[in-house]
Image (cartoon, grey):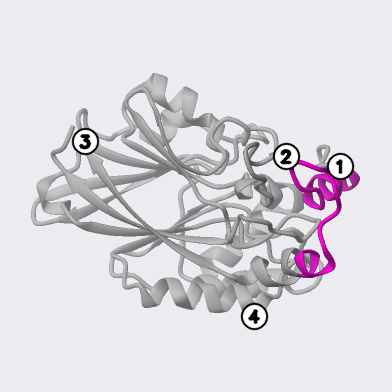
Amino acid sequence: MSSHPQRFSRRAFLRASLQVVGGGALVTSGSAAYAFVAEKEWVAVERVTLDLPRLPAAFDGYRLAQISDLHFGSAVRPEYLLEACQQVSALTPDAIVITGDFVSRLNNGEADWVTRAVHALSAPDGVYATLGNHDWWEHAETVSAAVEQGGGTLLRNRHVRLERLGGSLYLAGVDDIWEGQHDLAAALTGIPSGAGVVLLAHEPDFADEVAADGRVDLQLSGHSHGGQVRLPIIGAPLTPRLGKKYKHGWYRVGPLQVYTNRGLGLARPAVRINCRPEITLFTLRAGQA
């Protein structure tokens, strides 16, 4: 297997994580303990209402839950991630989507935990996912098999149609952009003109290409983890490649709406400051400009 692409500098990330704006002083020991222990498992449920002009009236009020970046591996407890997935199901969404990076490694039973986590997700219209760069850096087919064994449906450059009272909503997904596995044209082929489309794409900065295409209403992404550290005034000082423009939360890129989820897991160092792990619960509304 080829070597992994360059990760964040651990030293640079720690330096940014352990400084405060205005004096450059190190945070107190209590604050450091909070950053490394408390916030990384303090899940926030973000409830977001989005107006989608091409959403059929039959889907008005549709509830779509998103999680991302579980990163099963050494940085977070697998039991915490399983509990978070159970929390998603307890929100009773109509469908659930997962926008990639299931694992950080695959040498200590992580694939089995992925299967257990996906199995804990339950929604009437199903659970859908796409892969991320870490899944490819480890072994994409092993991760894919684990997701499918848990009952999830992978959208790797393809789409599915959801139906309700004669109306249709299309969920599409592209495979990982960083690794050049994506094919937007293939993902959207066969979707009727003017249909409502939600796209799963792990890396949020792909939105510029999606917006130029014009057929997608909403792109859901992860990858950036919101920066993991968000400092006063300057925001997230460090984000990964393809996660620098649309770092977290809601954006509009021309006709396209983009939402970047902060993720449930972590890249190392395992620290979060002012950037809690996230479950997003969308309510989709039809017919609004």
Regarding residue 116, the answer to whether it shows in the image is: no
Q: Out of 165 and 38, give the one closest to the viewer.
A: 38
Q: Is residue 191 magenta?
A: no
Q: In the figure, is residue 75 to the left or right of 171?
A: right
Estimate the spatial distance between the alpha carbons at disc 3 and disc 4, rounded to whole Å: 39 Å
- Residue at position x 48%, y 24% in the image: 208
Dots 4 and 1: beta carbons under 8 Å? no
- Mark 1 sits on what residue? 12
Q: Residues within 10 Å of mark 3 (few under 14, many from 20)?
A: some
Horizontal relation, residue 68 to residue 16: left or right: left
Find the magenta span and give its range: 9-33
Which residue type does callout 1 highlight?
Ala
Query: CA gap, disc 1 to disc 3?
Result: 45 Å
Give the mark nearest the N terminus, 4 or 1: 1
Identity, as a three-letter code, of the amino acid under mark 3 = Ala
Which one is in front, 96 or 287? 287
Residue assigned mark 3: 195
Q: Which residue is mark 4?
A: 79
Of tags 2 and 3, the one toward the viewer is 2
- Which residue appears at 53% of the width and 35% of the height? 246
Helix, strand or loop status at disc 1? helix
Q: Does the segment drawn in magenta span residue 13?
A: yes
Tell me the distance, in whole angstroms, between the alpha carbons under discs 2 and 3: 37 Å
Amino acid type, residue under disc 4 in the picture: Glu
Q: Residue at x 62, y 62 (%)?
A: 70
Residue marked by disc 2: 238
Which quadrant of the structure image shows residue 123? bottom left
Q: Earlier in the sequence, mark 2 or mark 4?
A: 4
